[in-house]
Amino acid sequence: MKAARGEMRIVLVGPPGAGKGTQARMLQQTFTIPQISTGDLLREAVREGTRLGQQARIYMDAGELVPDQLVTAMVAERLRRPDCAKGFLLDGFPRTIAQADALAAELAAHQERLDGVVSIVVPRADLVERLSGRWVCKACGAMYHERFDPPQRVGVCNRCQGALYQRNDDNVATVNARLEVYERATAPLLDYYRRHGVLHEINGSGKPEEVFQRIATVLRSLPPPAQP
Ligand code: AP5
């Protein structure tokens, strides 16, 4: 079974609120490959006030994409770290054709390629509801939903007692902007990866555990990576 070998280079793609982060956290434990979330990396840069963070913040608060060259450089640096040697789960990257081309070039330079791209499909009305009810722990990053997965105490993380907050970009106006950006810039990636024969579309409705089982079934059925 592939999970035991932990050798998989996977991309999770889907609109804001599709459940990429929720699923990536569950998958990284089962398949023992690191989750690399460009949203999380960028939010960390914003929190730390780095040069990248200062540049990225303006785009993120507006629901726009951070420019390709900033994000691809950040991901290339992350993929070169030792924990990615046997695979990774990219969450929220690539988001444009230019980013997909840059990723393919980076992998090819190391005689690697993607094993699979999982697209999580959820109706738009559900996306808005999921995002407007999302609460995240400031301390450990655990995610809650005020209706689907509420914390035991309002505003307090079950796991570490940290304070919960709502992301700056989860207000209705910015969510709508993010959904439009997804349709315009990211949805064309589905055809791109379909043409490359690596796209798997997954129904993202239902309980997180049910969605997880659908994705895990796909990942376990992937052919082993070609030997260099
Ligand atoms: P990012 O952080 O990647 O945000 P996103 O893609 O908009 O995705 P989200 O994190 O909002 O949603 P998700 O799909 O992970 O869903 P989640 O699991 O959290 O990016 C933020 C910004 O950073 C971008 O707008 C852009 O500015 C910038 N950026 C990032 N990557 C970039 C890139 N590559 N290029 C350029 N710019 C980039 O779930 C959402 C909610 O739903 C939670 O409350 C959860 O509990 C709930 N939920 C999850 N699954 C279910 C379920 N099955 N049923 C019911 N509720 C569920």
Image (cartoon, helix red, strand yellow):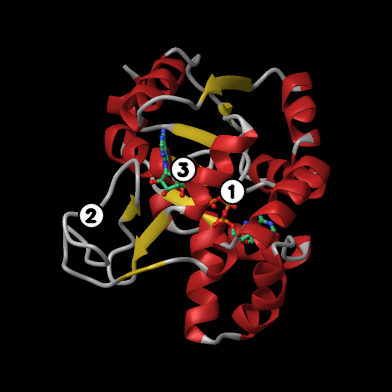
Amino acid under disc 1: Gly
- Sequence-wise, the earlier of marks 1 and 2 is 1
Amino acid under disc 2: Pro
Mark 1 lies on a secondary structure that is: loop
- Sequence-wise, the earlier of marks 3 and 2 is 3
Q: Is residue 226 visible?
A: no
Left or right of 64, for residue 30: left
Q: Please state the horizontal and vertical placement of residue 77, each as a whole percent of the image.
A: 57, 63
Left or right of 99, for residue 216: left
Q: Nearer the viewer, residue 154 or 103?
A: 154
Spatial CA distance of label 1 from label 2 is: 25 Å
Figure quadrant of the N terminus = top left
Amino acid under disc 3: Phe
Residue 92 numbered tag? 1
Mark 3 lies on a secondary structure that is: strand
Q: Is residue 66 visible?
A: yes
Which residue is disc 2 drawn over? 151
Residue 88 numbered tag? 3
Residue at 77 percent across and 50 percent down: it is 181
Residue at 48 percent across and 81 percent down: it is 47
Residue at 46 percent across and 43 percent down: it is 88
